[in-house]
Image (cartoon, coloured by chain):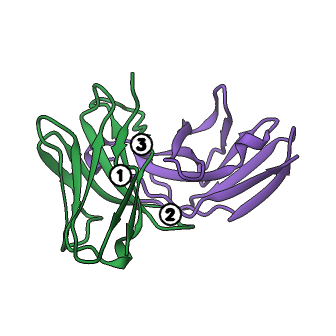
């Protein structure tokens, strides 16, 4: 059973470009979470999605950021018109639909660098 | 979400037992306590979770006193490969809360030979 997969692992963008980060959850997992981590800091929650639904986006910046988890295919975190402050590691995690333990399984992350 | 406080860093030597304590004075009745481990350039990895008393698995033990206002992660006989950042989190057991995890800055454990 493959773990959570994220791609690309490294992404370089110039200011003003768009960044698309992909996350394929573990097989059988229908819950996906996105987190952002700045150097030397902990992870900060961004958004929680289930298939075709955004459940909690309280950690998402109001502008330029969006996320989706379509019925088919990976979850996508999209950042429009990137700025240098968007440079960070973005982690995706998934969990099964009926997990009382609330354990999340994390992917390896995508490191975004904005030039 | 209950706020957690843990030491910023700890040093240890190979073969020693390491205990990392986390304070969560405002823990709520439905909150459980979870510890994650993160290596450089990797995503966090679940270590252990508990609600009260003691929990043990093949990796670590988790001690939770009766008042649940703190918890201690115990790593027996650490090795160099245990050098990582350890995060203590508290979260609501109710799925309807959104399941989001709140990570603090964690404890950087450095294991020396």
Q: Residue at x 35, y 52 (%)?
A: B100
Quarter of the rendering containing residue B73: top right
Judge if badges 1 and 3 mark residues of a common chain.
Answer: no
- Identify the mark at residue B100; answer none if there is no mark: 1
Q: Chain of mark 3?
A: A
Relative to A85, B56 lies left or right: right
Judge if badges 3 and 2 mark residues of a common chain.
Answer: no
Distance CA(mark 1)–CA(mark 3): 16 Å
Q: Secondary structure at mark 3?
A: loop
Task: Tell me residue B36's x, y (percent).
Answer: 55, 45
Q: Secondary structure at mark 2?
A: loop
Residue corresponding to mark 2: B3
The chain drawn purple is chain what? B
Task: Tell me residue A14's x, y (percent).
Answer: 30, 73
Distance CA(mark 2)–CA(mark 1): 14 Å
Q: Is residue B58 above or below residue B77?
A: above
**Residue nearest the observer in this picture, A18 or A89:** A18
- Circle 3 packing at 10 Å, graded few (<14), some (14-19), many (20+), is many
Relative to A48, A73 lies left or right: left
């Amino acid at each position: 059973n493959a773990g959570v997969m994220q791609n690309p692992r490294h992404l370089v963008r110039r200011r003003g470009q768009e960044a698309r980060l992909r996350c394929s959850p573990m097989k059988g997992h229908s819950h996906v979470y996105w987190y952002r981590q700045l150097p030397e800091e902990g992870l900060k929650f961004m958004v929680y999605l289930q298939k075709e639904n955004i459940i909690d986006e309280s950690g998402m910046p109001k502008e330029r950021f969006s996320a989706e988890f379509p019925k088919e295919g990976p979850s996508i975190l999209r950042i429009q018109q990137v700025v240098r402050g968007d440079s960070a590691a973005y982690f995706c995690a998934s969990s099964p639909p009926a997990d009382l333990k609330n354990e999340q399984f994390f992917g390896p992350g995508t490191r975004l660098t904005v030039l | 979400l209950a706020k957690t406080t843990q030491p910023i860093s700890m040093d240890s030597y190979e073969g020693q037992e390491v205990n990392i304590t986390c304070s969560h004075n405002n823990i709520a009745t439905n909150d459980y306590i979870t510890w994650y481990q993160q290596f450089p350039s990797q995503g966090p990895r679940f270590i252990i979770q508990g609600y009260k008393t003691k929990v043990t698995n093949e990796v670590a033990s988790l001690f939770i006193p009766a008042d649940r206002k703190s918890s201690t992660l115990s790593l027996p006989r650490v090795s160099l490969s245990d050098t990582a950042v350890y995060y203590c989190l508290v979260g609501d057991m109710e799925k309807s809360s959104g399941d989001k995890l709140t990570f603090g800055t964690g404890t950087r454990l450095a294991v020396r030979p």
